[in-house]
Image (cartoon, rainbow, N blue to C red):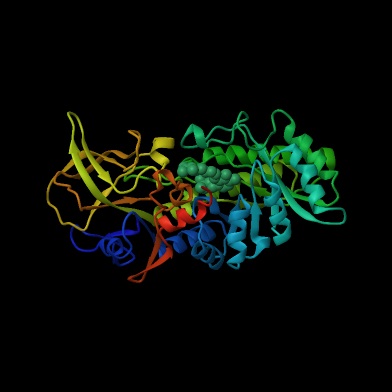
Amino acid sequence: PASTTEHRPGDLAVGGVPLAEVADRFGTPVYVLDEDEVRERCRTYRDAFPDAEVLYAAKAFLCRAMVHWTAEEGLGLDVCSAGELELAVTTGFPPERIVLHGNAKSPRDLETALRLGVGRIVIDSPSEIARLAAAVGPGGHQKVMVRVVPGISAGGHEKIRTGTDDQKFGLSIADGYAQHAIARILDQPQLELTGLHCHLGSQITSVKPYLAAVRRLVGLMARLHEQHGLVLPELDLGGGHGVAYRPGEAALDLTALARRVRAELTQACATAGLPVPRLIIEPGRAVVGPAGIAVYRVLAVKKTGEHTFVAVDGGMSDNPRPALYGVRYAPRLVGRASAAPTAPVTVVGRHCEAGDVLAADAGLPADVRPGDLLAVPVAGAYHLSMASGYNLVGRPPVTAVRAGHVRLLVRRESLEDIRRRDVGL
Ligand code: LLP
């Protein structure tokens, strides 16, 4: 990724700080975020989509510093729980620039959203309409969008595809559920429907599904205009913008996305005789993924008949993505100038499962040995946010580097933290 530079030959540095120094100061495993790169990625979105609203999808990674950076760079936020929402608002994020998602919003989610004055709530199921209307109360007012399913298959892995009809999110257009729900929303005076939302899936590397989504959603907008005289001012295309996890892999071309979505939207609206709605997008991974690196210490090296296993001090508890989606990473050796040729090894974690594999065919110097540091690039999104408590190893800390300095953003989860929650005997 752009954030990694060779500090000295064979050494790796981020933001001018050698990763070996971060590991010495904060221990391993540790996440390292390049603050400048996160900010730069936010600005790339603002520049590519100057008249759209760009919401950073907090599920990819959230901490108070990230909330600040997002706010300062002019992005809004997409949250999907009272937890994400509260962290953002208590850090000073303007609630009106936050959108709440969720296919199963709890009473606490809705109560928090209404209490904090969240900008929009995205309705995902018919039962939510009456529940939300009741929570808002007669005489109250809440802006909502409705999540529709356009019937488009896209995304990196079956488990993260959400644009097709037979999955848990949203309301199908093809089956008429979306239209039915919208009619019910329009019956609720305290709910103001501002637009349609869809999210096709994640790790999408082609522009085409987004263009198809524009056509599908504008088609629905045209029917709603005919039936209800409705003109919706917003259209939210969700996130899903793919990044390269290994050198040579494709990423979604944001400039092309912006240009072609804009053209498609203008064209489709002209055909339908509708004004062009304000576009909203919700990137998560592409904002923060490539700006983060995970650093591990090698604890053991072992050969079997066919493989060399390099075992590190983290694994599926801090990165479940290889096990969940079969994602392949390209770890690199840190801090030891080695001219030894690379050989394929299997980088495994420390957890009690044979499936705890971080990288199945990593090219590492043949003399990799215990004590070495391994850096796993593109670890900024869906690593810490999906970290678990498995084997009570404690979740790793998050550090940020900028202008040659490193600072701690989120400290390591200690045994004391774990013990404190354990209140029974
Ligand atoms: N908007 C909505 C409604 C979403 O559900 C998501 C992601 C996003 C935006 C942001 O998508 P992104 O731009 O980050 O692709 N854990 C998986 C990814 C799951 C994404 C869930 N929703 C992974 O590690 O690949």
Foreground residue among 64 and 240: 64
Residue 306 occupies quadrant: top left
Q: Position of residue 333 (x, y in %)?
A: 23, 51
Q: Position of residue 303 (x, y in %)?
A: 17, 35
Q: Is residue 202 left or right of residue 408?
A: right
Residue 240 visible somewhere in the drawing = no
Foreground residue among 424 and 53: 424
The residue positioned 35% from the left and 59% from the top of the image is 3
Q: Position of residue 247 (x, y in %)?
A: 31, 46
Q: Relative to residue 410, is residue 245 depicted above or below?
A: above
Q: Position of residue 161 (x, y in %)?
A: 53, 35
Exactly how many numbered labels are in the figure? 0
Residue 307 visible somewhere in the drawing = yes
The residue positioned 40% from the left and 47% from the top of the image is 392
Residue 164 occupies quadrant: top right
Q: Is residue 68 left or right of residue 101?
A: left
Q: Relative to residue 36, is residue 278 depicted above or below?
A: above
